[in-house]
Amino acid sequence: MRNHILFPQSFLLFLTVIAGVSCEQADTSLTPLLPEQLTNTADQPALGTHGMVSSGHPLATQAGLEIFAAGGNAFDAAIAVAAALNVTEPMMSGIGGYGTVIVYDARRGRARFLNCSSRIPAAVDSDVYRPPTPNYRQNRRNAKAVSTPGNVHAWQLMHQDYGKLSWDKLFQPAIELAEQGFILRARTANSIGSAFRSFPEHAQDIYGPSGAPLKGGERLIQKELGHSFRLIAQQGAEVVYNGSIAQAIDQAMRQAEGFLSIDDLRKDKAEWFEPISINYRDCQVITASPPSTAFPSLIRLGMMSRFDPSELGHNTTEYLHRFAEVTKHAFWCRLAYAGGPDLSPPPLNRLLSEEYWKQQVGQIDLNQAKPFEYPGIISEPSPHTTHFVVADKFGNIVCATQTLGNAFGSRIMPEGTGIWLNNSLAYCTFEPKGNPMDAHAGHYKLSGDCPTLIIRNGRPWVAIGTPGGHTIGQTVPQMLMNLIDFNMNIQQAIAAGRISFVEPDTLSIERTIPEMVRQQLAQRGHKIRTGGSLGCAHGLTIEYDQQGLPIRFTGAADPRGQGLAKGY
C-alpha cells in the first residue's frame, strides 16, 4: 500500500528536486534512482545513493529528506524527524518524552550512545507506586509517573557536536505540520478516540474541536505545539528546562501533585556514554550501555552463537525452541541484573562472555520447554514507542528509539504548550522495594530501548531498532539473525515472523509463523499465545566503494506499521 500514498503537489515537486540533487552529486557510474525507486514496498527495501530515512510516519520521513535537500547531515535530519514525529504521532514521543539514541560519527569512525532518559525527579517517593498506598496503580500512570523529559536536551547536544545546519531550520517541517495540520490516518485517530475522555479540556479542544474526537481523514491542527517548537527553534533547549515551557510544566505538575519540578528540569543534562558490543559471526553488534537495559539482546545473540541458526532453518520448530529458551534466560538476566552506571551496574564482563553463554546454553533442554522462574522482580511492558533511522552520504548514522511511555504518556498537557508529558516511571519495577529498577529518586531512569548497529569489515553495515516494550530486546536479535545468518535483505529481515516471551510463562507467536510450528512448540511444553504484531521496526543498510565511501543505501519500514523508508 505504501506505493499508493497520496502526497500534495508540492511534495511531488520536492521528490523531483531531491532526485535531481542525488543525480548531480552521484558518481557518474551510478544509475540515478527514480522517485518511485526510493520508497520501500512490502517485500523490497527502499534504495538511495546519498542517504536514507525510515520512520513511523511518511511526513516525518519527508521532514528528514527536506533537511538533506537543504544541505543537512544525518544528525540534522534526525532532529527534524524526531520533531515531526511529535506532531504526526503525538501519542508516541516528543518534547515531553525520553529515549535512547545510538549514533555513528563517520569522521572519527566511532559509535556513541546518547542518553535521553535523564534522571528520576528528586522528590519521588517510590512507595506511592506500591501497595498498600491507595490508588498505587493509578499513580503509575498519572502525574506522579512523570519523569524528567530528556529529548530536547539530547537533540541540542547532538546538534552542538555534529550538526551542520542552523538549529532553527531543523524545526521548520514540524512547525508547518503542527500549525497547518495534516490528515489523520485511521490508526492515529483510533488512538485519539480511545484516550480522548481522559484528556484535559484544553487538549480535547485540540484533538476534538467539535466536541468529538477527530476521525481518520480529518485534519489535526496543533497550533500550541507549533508555538512550542517555535520557542525551541528560537531559544534552544533552555526554554524547555528553564524558560516559559519549563514554567508551564512546573505549574502543571504542582496542580496535579506530581513529583517533577522546575529544579529537576534545570538540573537535567544530556550525556554521551560508550556503547556496549559483542562479536557475532564476523560482525560487531553495538547497542546502548547502562542506564539502558539493552544488554539482554546481546546475551540472546551470544547464546544463539553456540548454535547454527542457518542449519536449523529459519523459524523452524528447532530454531524457535532454542531461541525461546534463550530469550527466557536473557529476560531473567534483565530482571536480575539491570541497573544504572550509578546504582548496581550489571556484571557485563560476565554476562557478555563466551564462557557464560556456553554455560547457559548447556542448561537448555533441546526437547522440552522449562518453566520461567522469577528472580524476584516483576515488570511491565511499554508498547507505545517509536523508532527511526537516518544515514547520510558521509556514512553518519542516527538510530533512535523515543517514547512517552503509555499512549499520550501521563495524559497531562501543560496549558498553552501542546506538549504531552511522559509517564516514564510506570516502567520502573516496584517489587521488591529497593531493587535496581525501582524508582530511585535522583538516579538515572533505566530504559529498555535497543537501537543497534552492526559493523562489518570495519564499517557500519546495519542500523536497526523497534518499539515494543519488553519485546524490543527479543525482536532485535531475531532481525539481526535474519540479516546475518539467513542473508535476508533489510525489508525481509524486518517483515519476517517473530516470537517473544511474555510474563509469566507465555510464548507469543505472530500468525505468520506456520500453524504446524506453533503446534510442535506447544507439544514441547511452550504455552503458546498466537497474537498480533510484535514491534514496528525501522532499519537501513549501507554499502561502500573500494575507498570506503557510501555508495548505496537500503531502508525498510515495518509492514506492521504505517511508516515509510525513503532513499535520497
Image (tube, rainbow, N blue to C red):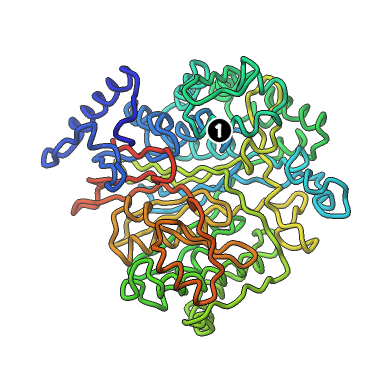
Q: Is residue 557 visible?
A: yes
Out of 163 and 256, give the one closest to the viewer.
Answer: 256
Residue at x 25% of width, y 42% of height: 47
Q: Residue 70 placed where, x, y %?
A: 34, 26
Residue at x 53% of width, y 80% of height: 360
Residue that mark 1 sits on: 190
Residue 485, by quadrant, is: bottom left
Quadrant of the image containing the N terminus: top left
**In this picture, is 213 found above or below 93?**
above
Q: Is residue 274 visible?
A: no
Out of 208 and 330, give the one closest to the viewer.
Answer: 208
Q: Residue 388 placed where, x, y %?
A: 44, 42
Count the marks. 1
Residue type of the residue flagged with mark 1? Asn
Q: Is residue 121 left or right of residue 390?
A: right
Q: Of all residues shown, which one is farthest toward the left?
A: 29
**In this picture, is 378 found above or below 524?**
above
Out of 199 and 86, give the one closest to the viewer.
Answer: 199
Residue 454, by quadrant, is: bottom left
Q: Residue 253 placed where, x, y %?
A: 78, 32
- Tell me the SS state at disc 1: helix
**In this picture, is 117 found above or below 238?**
below
Residue at x 38% of width, y 64% of height: 481
